[in-house]
Image (spheres, rainbow, N blue to C red):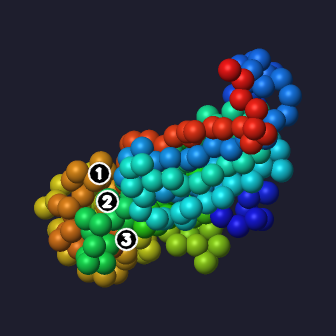
Amino acid sequence: MNKITQKLNVDDLILQALREDIPGEDVSTNAVVPEARPGTVDLIAKEDGIVAGLEVFARVFTLLDDQTQVEFLCEDGEKIRKGQKLAVVTGDIRVLLSGERVALNYLQRMSGIATYTHQTVSLLEGTGITLLDTRKTSPNNRIFEKYAVRVGGGSNHRTGLSDGVLLKDNHIGAAGSVTRAVKMAREYAPFVRKIEVEVETIDQVREAVEAGADIIMLDNMSDDAMREAVKLIAGRAKVECSGNATRENISRLKDIGVDYVSSGALTHSAPVLDLSMKHLRPLDGEVEQ
């Protein structure tokens, strides 16, 4: 996540999260640490996984106080182990305490997505199939969640509605037919845009091919129907399949012949990775008894 992206897109989102958690003051912290006091705390992994979002984790603290220092002991995309120290955060103890929950929320969520994606991608290894995410992300967290998918080895589908043409069932219903929807999209969208069409039946597959769709998404079709669809398309369009593809069942799609598998589960069903900030200690040598 480069610096330009961070300042244009990320900082405002993190500040919103901080304002949600600290709408007035951090009463607990202000009660026990009434004045600035230097300290340090460790970031510890409580289970195995793939870490993602370290810069976002650090940015929470530096937005609260730009004097905060974060020393990373690993990198995004690295396999981490239970009990491993991942980072050391040093700064005003009030900042360490007030930023802890928001920082961990981002890092645990992003690392969970990266871990789940990595596990799912590994099940497609050697097939040539590209694993894609979807727009089924939590509001205002898409940039973080889709980044985590990439860290885990997956690829991003559209980031938003402005990125490409995907004609789903309701678009087709609004247009009147697959053929008309593709024709209208071709006339409206710039020529550099690919047109993808979601289909649910073999008849719609045939219509999408004849209409000149660039990508055909087979939505919630049976395995046998998808094999028939791939044979019918015969390389005239790229083929994506979608519909309840999860880590638990994705292996069944390996020999269907599709180019892409999209999985909403990567972002909406990945469990968080358990991480914790532990061993906070003052650096001024004074500890109240």
What SS does tag 1 mark? loop
14 on left or right of 138: right
Camera-side residue of 179 and 74: 74
Badge 1: few (under 14), some or many (20 or more) residues near its Cα, within 10 Å?
Answer: some
Do we see residue 142 in this rendering?
no
* Residue farthest toward the right in the current orientation of the protein: 35
* Quadrant where the N terminus is found in the figure: bottom right
185 on left or right of 11: left
Q: CA distance from mark 2 to mark 3?
A: 11 Å
Q: Going 63% across and 37% down the picture, which residue do you hit?
A: 280
What SS does tag 2 mark? helix
Q: Which residue is mark 3?
A: 130
Q: Going 34% across and 81% down the picture, which residue do you hit?
A: 236
Tell me if label 1 and label 2 are in contact, CB under 8 Å.
Answer: yes
Disc 2 marks a residue whose amino acid type is: Thr
Q: Going 78% across and 49% down the picture, which residue do you hit?
A: 68
Tell me if label 3 and label 1 are in contact, CB under 8 Å.
Answer: no
Sequence-wise, the earlier of marks 2 and 3 is: 2
Q: Which residue is mark 2?
A: 120
